[in-house]
Image (cartoon, rainbow, N blue to C red):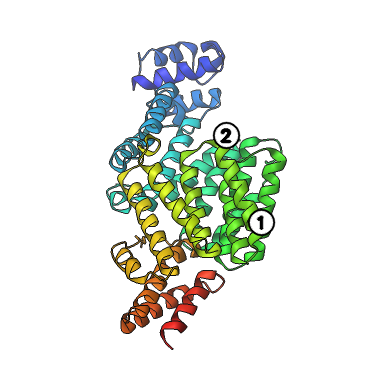
Amino acid sequence: MEHIGKNIKRIRQEKNMTIADLANEHISAGMISLIENNKTKPSIDRLQHIATNLNVPLSDILGKYSREELRKIIQTFKEKAKLNDPEMTIEQLEKLQNLLPHLGEMYETAIIHELIARHTYFLFALHPEPFKELSNQDWKYHAEKAISLFNQLQMEWRALSIKVLLANASALEANYEEAIEIVDKALKEDIFEDNKDAQATYIDLLYIKAMSLESLGKREEAYAIAQKAIDYMKKHFIMNRFFEINNMVALLLYDNFRFSEARKVAEQVEQFVTLTENDELWLDMLFNQIHYNEFYEENFKRAYELIDQTKEALETERYAHLADYQIKDVHTFLKDAKARCLTREGKYEQAIPIFENNEHFIPEHITMNPVDTSLRIISKSYLARCYYRVGKRKEARKLAYDTFNILSDYPHTSYYFFAREVLREVTR
């Protein structure tokens, strides 16, 4: 009970109120002094009168932790979360969960709900096995609670950023129409013009909408929304999604055989990444350039050069911070890219063992968008072609059929047409 008196005194002083200011016909100054100094146990009725006079929820008075203590806890969580250790994240999430029954409806409480929502979802999406160890896996409850608290605090832009999380989650679950609905509803909120954080969130929302439209095969609409986002970024000098959105545009252009335009966009992306000196973006950019050169440009020499460049970069101190699973994913991609180039060059016997010993991980607990799925599945069409060319006709036909059946869900992509071409080739 000692914390109740401390809370009342702290809130009163934050509001520049004296004990006399707080007293009224329901509770005397003397009684308030006794409560603040832990000399008596107040009834709920008295505490409610004090809360009313302080213009705060009763829960703020009953809260066990001061705002300063909560800020330190929040900062500690953020620092440990940067380590990208699932087990440590779980431990820290459990600690935050245990705080909630003792907290009032204040800014720090909203932040804690937001942290729980984001990092619980992060575990679900990237670390499904550790995620199962969490005692409370309902990240959406915490997202909605954070939205509610931020709206109460008139921090609508913070609430809006959590709606981005909800929309993105719907997209990852292949609920693209739902994601678009969440985005369109959020875009109607009139809070964007004078708030840079809200403007950055506006761009995030457009990005999710463009991705969802592309996943639904509505490529012209997706391109228009992506261009709208790019124009908005330039107008407001906010580049939070410049890399992702321009990569989407480049891929859409390549897939529509508008190669010269796609190259210009890819060059702009490289200039942007060079300026930012961001190691993660640099790695992603190399992945994209390898794919463009192998699949669309058929410039295998350049693709090989980029593969070697990426391998060399991984050995430097620059990428020493990557987790083992991240390094494994990079090497899987690079081996796959090399095997594809070898296939395109007709070096089938060299490509086969690389494909056979280099299986892509495809998560079952989330649904990847059509492009990501296609990029992982299409290699099986390459392998089918290799089998066919070395005389393994039965294996080639089965693999080609299986791959085509999966990619037939995405008939608007070049990967589908490639799989169809291979199927026709091996079934002549």
Judge from the rendering whether residue 289 lies leftward or rightward of residue 308; answer left or right. Answer: right
User: Which residue was labeled with disc 2?
Assistant: 153
Residue positioned 46% across, 51% down in the render: 306
Q: Amino acid at mark 1?
A: Ile
Q: Amino acid at mark 2?
A: Leu
Label placed on residue 225:
1
- Residue 157: percent from left, percent from top: 60, 39
| Quadrant position of residue 79 | top left
Residue positioned 49% across, 20% down in the render: 11
Seen from the viewer's position, the closer of residues 31 and 299 is 299
- Residue 364: percent from left, percent from top: 36, 63
- Residue 167: percent from left, percent from top: 53, 54
- Residue 193: percent from left, percent from top: 71, 39
Residue positioned 49% across, 23% down in the render: 50
Q: Secondary structure at mark 2?
A: loop
Q: Secondary structure at mark 1?
A: helix
| Quadrant position of residue 334 | bottom left
Label placed on residue 342:
none
- The quadrant of the rendering that contains the N terminus is top left
- Residue 185 visible at all: no
How far apart in space, not on screen, are marks 1 and 2 (Cα)?
Answer: 31 Å
- The quadrant of the rendering that contains the C terminus is bottom left
Q: Residue furthest bottom?
A: 428
